[in-house]
Amino acid sequence: MLDDRELWKKISEGDAEAFDALYRESAARLRAFLNHLLGNVQAAEDVMQDTFAGFWRHPHGFDPERGSLRAYLFGMGRNRAAEWWRKQKPSESFSEEAAPCRTEKSSMVADAFNQLTNEQRTLLWLREVEGQSYTELAAILEVPVGTVRSRLFVARQALRSVWHGERITKGGSHEVR
Amino acid sequence: MKCDEAAEFVSALCDGELIPRAEAEHIGTCPACQLLMREYIEMGAELRRVASLEGAESTTPRVWSGPESLFANWWKRGWRTMRIPRLAFVTLIAAIAVLGSSLALVKVRAHSEGTVLVLKVARPDAEPVACPLSTRDRNYATCGFFGTTNGKNIGYKIDLLGHDGSRVQLGVRTKNLGARTGPEDLADIQGEPQQEVDFEPGETLKIDMPGTGMLTVTGEWFDHMPAFIGTGSNREIDPQANELRMVMPLLLRDGTLVGDLEGASATAPDLAAVIVYIRGEGLFILSPTPVKGAVKAHVNLSRITFNEDAHAYTFLTGVPVTRSNHLWVLHNAGFKPSSQMDSKFWITTFDVNKLPSEWTSSAR
């Protein structure tokens, strides 16, 4: 298995096989992430494809010193998702917009998650699902590491708050602290 | 310590981050904080479960062929109509750039609403070269030059692929010619892989071109095509020491115009020579140092005069040629270029000590 730097080098040299390996390994994960940002399966597919195509066209934006290749791809995807939102509703801010996500694999936590702001969903998804480090998150979101910590906390609190509300609505028997 | 004060560190602890000792001790002994942590962990696990289900869905297979420009057709149209003479370049230090029609130095305030982007492209250990690109005039959609980096002769070509506000998309191609000094054409670089980059003036863009080294690009917007002196970033009217500049020269023979190198110029540093070929007139080697068989020419700012074979020659250029008041001209009237080099005219620079014999052998 190639490490990020070797894989990136091959991709930079136009190695389609290396790029396809990255695509097969990461595309579904990126699409799942985008689906929760965009709340639209087709848009998530389109933005995911656009993200990979953009990276294939000019891979030299990636800096191995700043984080993993996957973190970079997810950062690209997040930016393109923001662009998609701006085109849909130019007057509304990406970070303040909460997009309803219809997923068949819904759960109470997932439903609560979909009520968070885009930035909160981005942070929680990249941290909890993708396992991005604070340093990588700071690079993706272009904020200091300390800000990542505080914003993750706020996002978790928001999710917990909505989740507890969901428990009351759907279950009615859960204890609420 | 209150739970509220420790709550942020409960979150950090879930992520495996190191937290301050006092908060760690509180969390370790506080049932409420431990419950909060369990909830955070449970939420994370649930998100991962959902993600696993969604991530397991298949993706559409794609075929990834060589990176291609979205603007390829647009570019090809631009290439056919571009004003850069498709010169044959024989280079060690040659540099050719598209030049504005005005020769006066005009300084304007750069702004983001301009239509002309002037890039400064710096190679390792070399002066930046000015590279003007227009968002409106396809004749100026491309710029290129040849230069020596680490002993290798390298061709550079930059295309303006598109722009969105003040951001532009550039296509960059380079070609490593090694130690080869044979004729080269910008069109030859077209076959090289193109690297597409986004750039916004104000940024410093580093482009690592495999095999040819790092390019450092800066740029400014202008509201018109600015005038350039020579091909470097040097905008002084005064030539640099040991520099020989020929900016869009005209050649007069006995008072009659016999050559017009519109749009082409060369700047030779470090006592290198400038080579000018004009179909029908032959090859002219202009050297700041003596060359066997050459005649001495007088230099007066932007005018070079010399007599040869009962004819009076004058080169008129856009800006002062050299700090010296004389140089040497070797005229090879019988020079026959190869078919590849047989353009109407071309100009280049060359190490005067390594001039190819075919340039000098049939000279008088």
Image (spheres, rainbow, N blue to C red):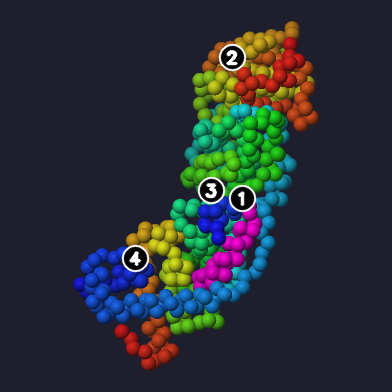
Residue at the spot of label 4 = B17
Residue at the spot of label 1 = A13
Whether label 3 touches label 2, CB < 8 Å = no
Rendering coords of residue B7 (x, y %): 29, 72
Comparing marks 1 and 2, which lies closer to the viewer? Answer: 1
Q: Residue at x 76, y 20 (%)?
A: B335
Tell me the element at label 1: loop
Q: Residue at x 51, y 75 (%)?
A: B51
Disc 4 marks a residue whose amino acid type is Glu
User: Within 10 angstroms of label 3, few (less than 14), some, or many (20 or more) residues?
Assistant: some
Q: Look at the picture and state if B305 lies above or below B206.
A: above
- Identify the residue at the far top of this view: B310
Q: Is residue A173 magenta?
A: no
Comparing marks 3 and 2, which lies closer to the viewer? Answer: 2
Disc 2 marks a residue whose amino acid type is Thr
Closer to the chain start, of discs 3 and 2, is 3
Give the CA separation, mark 3 to mark 2: 42 Å
Magenta stretch, overall SS: helix
Disc 3 marks a residue whose amino acid type is Phe
Closer to the chain start, of discs 2 and 4, is 4
| Chain letter for mark 3 | B
Q: Which mark is residue B289?
A: 2
Q: Look at the picture and state if B203 lies above or below B362.
A: below
Give the CA separation, mark 1 to mark 4: 37 Å
Residue at the spot of label 3 = B199
Instruction: Name which quarter of the figure residue A151 lies in.
Output: bottom left
Q: Residue at x 60, y 66 (%)?
A: A24
Whether label 3 touches label 1, CB < 8 Å = no
Q: Nearer the viewer, residue B98 or A102?
A: A102
- Give the magenta part as a residue range: A13-39
